[in-house]
Image (cartoon, rainbow, N blue to C red):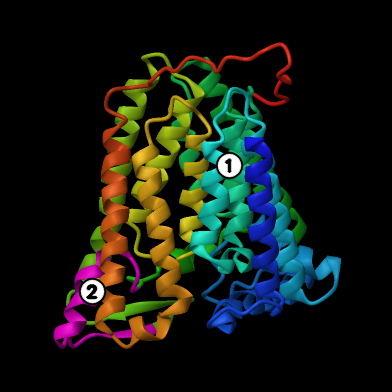
Amino acid sequence: MRLAAVWGCWLATRIVGLLIILDRFPYPTRDEILGDPAIYEGWSAILAGGEFPEGDVRWQYPPLAAPVMLLPRWLGGTYTTTFALVALAADLLIMVMLTRMRGGSRAGAWTWTLGLVLLGPMSYVRYDLMVTLAAVVALALLARRRVFGVLAAVGTMLKAWPLLLLLALPRNRRGLEEVGAFAVTCGTILAVFAVGMGRAPWGFLDAQTSRGLECEAVAATPFMIDRLSGWTGAIVYQYGSMELVGPGVARVADLLPLLTVLALGLVAVWAWRGAGRGWNAAWGCDVAFAAVLAAVATSRVLSPQYMLWLLGLGAVCLAHRASRQRPAVLMVLVAAALSQFLYPLNWQGLMAADTLETWVLAVRNVLVVAATVLAVARLRTGPATAPEPRRTSRDPEPAMG
């Protein structure tokens, strides 16, 4: 009955979300969220010609992004509509994985179902949903030998952040085998694209490293608040996002990569120590969630679609009864709702330095920081254990582990 309830809620909310994209259901500022599919469509025309759109500084994606961008073009129909249907299929696969995890809790499926509602219909017109699918499947199959390494590599070749999933691995020979599978898969994908397209497929890194401080990033919060009292800087569109330009911004932006390294180093140390004290899949998912949270909180960019990553990984954590990340995941859910309030619903107000929108951004970013601190701190004591749920003879045997 509980499974039917979560699936019923998922179906109802996804129908509404799709109708919003199709302009069959009212939604304020709907046109605001449809800009990215238009960019993807332009890139797909270049990709169809056998080249990466490296002349566009907004192209900041590893090579496997190419088939994802091309898929709606191959399937036909209006690009935005087809892209949304592909995203909906990815959403469905995530739900299937969350509801079929062995010994799992329904909390994971509910987190994902409600999380996308809180974040809004933007989720269906952003590439990040497909990347989140790869990460969720990888963590859901974390106990499968070598499969995790291959799936984490696929995610990394879609967008770089799933590389952090490797911190979820146990500290033993099997962990080394997974790293080997990851390396071989990445190398194979890069080689195939290099041969097929006649050039190295990692030019996207240039645009990625050149990005400045995006106005929604955690580190941008003091500058955004200072705008209320007459800060002399400005917000400009560059590298595909709204970035801050003004006194002190470049210095802060330059410090953030070091802060990211330090934060991930702390996660890695505690993950290494904890992995030697009774590693289990729940612990691995907790580590991956904390690592990605740390990367997001210290990043130069915090676009609203990044919340998809956190919602997906948080859902996998809560699908394990032994997870210690429930409070942090709840904070992420609230942050997702505030993200939709800011974008697209009140984006113009934020750009105009309106008081309400500015302080909502500040609260959202404080929640992200608090969730990060809590998620990382909960790694200190190592893995938790929880008994397997009781199963009667009439309970079906789950299909996945």
**Quarter of the image holding residue 301?**
bottom left
* Mark 1, residue position: 109
Q: Secondary structure at mark 2?
A: helix
Q: Is residue 227 above or below residue 127?
A: below
Image location of residue 143, percent across then percent down: 59, 23
Q: Nearer the viewer, residue 230 or 311?
A: 311
Q: Work out which residue is located at the far front of the displayed protein and give it.
A: 1
Give the quadrant of the N terminus.
top right
Left or right, 67 with reference to 144? right
Which mark's residue is nearer the viewer, 2 or 1? 1
* Mark 2, residue position: 249
Q: Report the magenta residues as a range.
A: 215-236
Q: Earlier in the sequence, mark 2 or mark 1?
A: 1
Callout 2 amino acid: Val
- Can I make out residue 172 in this image? yes
Callout 1 amino acid: Ala
Task: Give me the residue at 39% from left, 52% from top.
Answer: 332
- Can I make out residue 303 in this image? no
